[in-house]
Image (cartoon, rainbow, N blue to C red):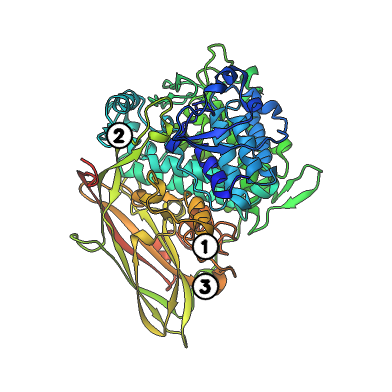
Amino acid sequence: MTTMSTTKKGLSLLFDRPREPIYKSRANKTVFSIPPEYIVNHFQPLLPHFGDDYNEEFIPIRRITIPPLGEILELQRDENFSLFIPKHRRIAGKFIDIFLAMANLDELLAVAVYAWDRVNPYLFNYALSVAILHRPDTQDFDLPPFIETFPDKYLDAKVFAKVREEMTVVPDGSRIPIKMPKDYTASDLEVEHRLAYFREDLGINLHHWHWHLVYPIEAAREVVAKNRRGELFYYMHQQIIARYNYERLCNKLERVTRLNDWTKEIEEGYFPKLDSLVAGRSWPGRFANQKIRDLNREVDQIKQDVEDLKRWSDRIYAAIHQGSVTDASGGTISLTENEGIDILGNMVESSILSPNRTFYGDLHNMGHVFISYIHDPDHRHLESFGVMGDLATAMRDPVFYRWHSYIDDIFQEYKATLPRYSENQLNYSGITVSNIEVQSEGSPNNTFNTFWQQSDVDLSRGMDFQPRGSVFVRFTHLQHQPFTYKITVNNQANGSRQGTCRIFLAPKNDEKGNPWLFRDQKTMFIELDKFTVNLKQGQNTINRASNQSSVTIPFERTFRNLDLNRPQGGEALAQFNFCGCGWPAHMLIPKGTPEGFASQLFVMISNYEDDKIDQKTDGVCNDAGSYCGIKDKLYPDRRSMGYPFDRMPRTGVDTLQQFLTPNMRVQDVTIKFSDRTVRPKQRN
């Protein structure tokens, strides 16, 4: 009988060396003892040679009735996998459901071992990861970061030749980190390359992948139907667009132009410099000034006209202005003031929660697909999709932000139909924010300081057919000096009060250097933090450190290559896995400029009685709730996501100052970038 700890160890080994045959000795000289019929025919003659090393530990695999895998096997092992392609996400949903249906961990391990050499490695990793995040008996399982298993989706292709050389020639313990260049996808002749540090940041792309693990598009309904999932799809991506536009202004570029005319050429080209280690091919690039065209790719079961995007879009806009959608049975669902955005989010994405996928279509996902096949829409060149077709790589491409700017425009159209917040809905009677300071060591008050930092990530888990042992790649990313908010709040009410402190940041001026109209500036605010405060009568001073942000997860949680700080088990570890979802802490603050980028820090104290959700949120995973929610809980804020900037302003409000009520305050701040690089202390 296999012990539970042994079974979970076996599961962990399924995130190691994804292309090596299942019978091969895995990490720490561990071997699966596999029923012969589980081994694919090609490897069966090798069975007598298993376990020649007497130091190996064996993990027995139970013989069970394997459920039919059917069309899951139609995706070849050497193909790329995309959750945007309808067939791929359908088979992913089926595979997830098979894993979820296993009665116990022994059966889960058995079916996973059987599938290992038969199912596409990317599909296998995704489906097993989603199942582990959602099965009650795997909540204490340590889910490795995706970059460890598939580093090829994140790192310069040139790095891997050097990594293989280091692993083959240099003994474990003597290897030095391989340095990856900060700029490798384009030269300064390409103006969009100014934003490469943001688009190609490893942490940002890992966040996007992990968010979609937690919020899958297709699987059993109980897995997909999380609290306010559609609204969270809207808000998380809206914040990405706001942040990207912020970075563009810091780099003297205009805000991104939405991709809303699909007959025009896409000006931006992009060449990712990535290789797929599974497919054995380079990721296709996109030349400048290409147009999306009708798709006819029999291999992917896609036959779709560009006109379909227009048809779906028109129907969604019509629903917004009608204030209701038509469900699959012909009934009417109202887009109410509070729930409408959630319905719309599920419809636009579109997940299985869409009220009528047939009528409202697959707008968001198929937009990704059209763009990702722009180089080979009819498969005549036998090419796979570009980076826009993969959740792990899509944010690298400049056109991602143009497409999502258009998607966000749909949501903003809906938000513009909602009643404006009145002063009473914004104010907190008796509460006044009287002062805001940002304090950072070694710099003047109200100054954020940014710079470059180098960090290491271990690739050994994903380097198939190479000697064992750690091998690190050193990459360069944006970082900021730690800082503290010091907020002075006066409570003039009788007795103590509770409030929600909401902190946002926005550029002070537009790209032309002019002060904003509030209706434009409101979509530029990025959320920095949100937390509950207790206010005694009289003056209160709130101190809040930057590393406590409700938006971010710490660096160690994004890149857990050695798992040094992980909890040992139980609920804490379940929360830890979920906590892989969150904006990377090193990217909390925009880059700024060497001379100092003028910005406005907004602080609001709202009435906690109007905000609160009656639930316990104790635990280690309540710190990135703004973008990711809280595991197995309701979203931790009753207000609309993005409040108070999610609706058009009340009559008479043209500027941010006119928008303010006494419980709000704005402080002018500066973001100052220093072009220096801080190197890691751990290794030379």
Considering every residue shown, the one lying at the far front of the view is: 54
Circle 3 or circle 2, nearest the eye:
2
The amino acid on which the numbered mark 2 sits, given as a three-letter code, is: Asp
Dot 3: within a 10 Å radius of its alpha carbon, few (fewer than 14), some, or many (20 or more) residues?
some
> Could you tell me which residue is drawn at 64 percent across and 39 percent down?
96
| Residue hosting label 2 | 172
Q: Is residue 378 left or right of residue 562?
A: right
Quarter of the C terminus within the rendering = top left
| Residue hosting label 1 | 651
For residue 273, which quarter of the picture? top left
The amino acid on which the numbered mark 1 sits, given as a three-letter code, is: Thr
Q: How far from the left and from the top, in percent, is residue 49?
A: 52, 22
**Disc 3 or 2, which lies upstream in sequence?**
2
| Residue hosting label 3 | 608
Q: How far from the left and from the top, in percent, is residue 363?
A: 61, 35
Q: Give the camera-side residue of 436 and 162.
A: 162
Q: Is residue 420 left or right of residue 663?
A: right
**Disc 1 or 3, which lies upstream in sequence?**
3
Kindly state the secondary structure of the residue where label 2 is placed: loop
Circle 1 or circle 3, nearest the eye:
3
Q: Is residue 243 in sight in this rendering?
A: yes
The amino acid on which the numbered mark 3 sits, given as a three-letter code, is: Tyr
> Could you tell me which residue is drawn at 52 percent across and 44 percent down?
9
Dot 1: within a 10 Å radius of its alpha carbon, few (fewer than 14), some, or many (20 or more) residues?
few
Circle 1 or circle 2, nearest the eye:
2
Quarter of the N terminus within the rendering = top right
Decide: marks 1, 3 in contact (CB < 8 A)? no
Q: How far from the left and from the top, in percent, is residue 324?
A: 71, 50
491 up-or-down from 312: above or below: below
Q: Give the camera-side residue of 61 and 264.
A: 61
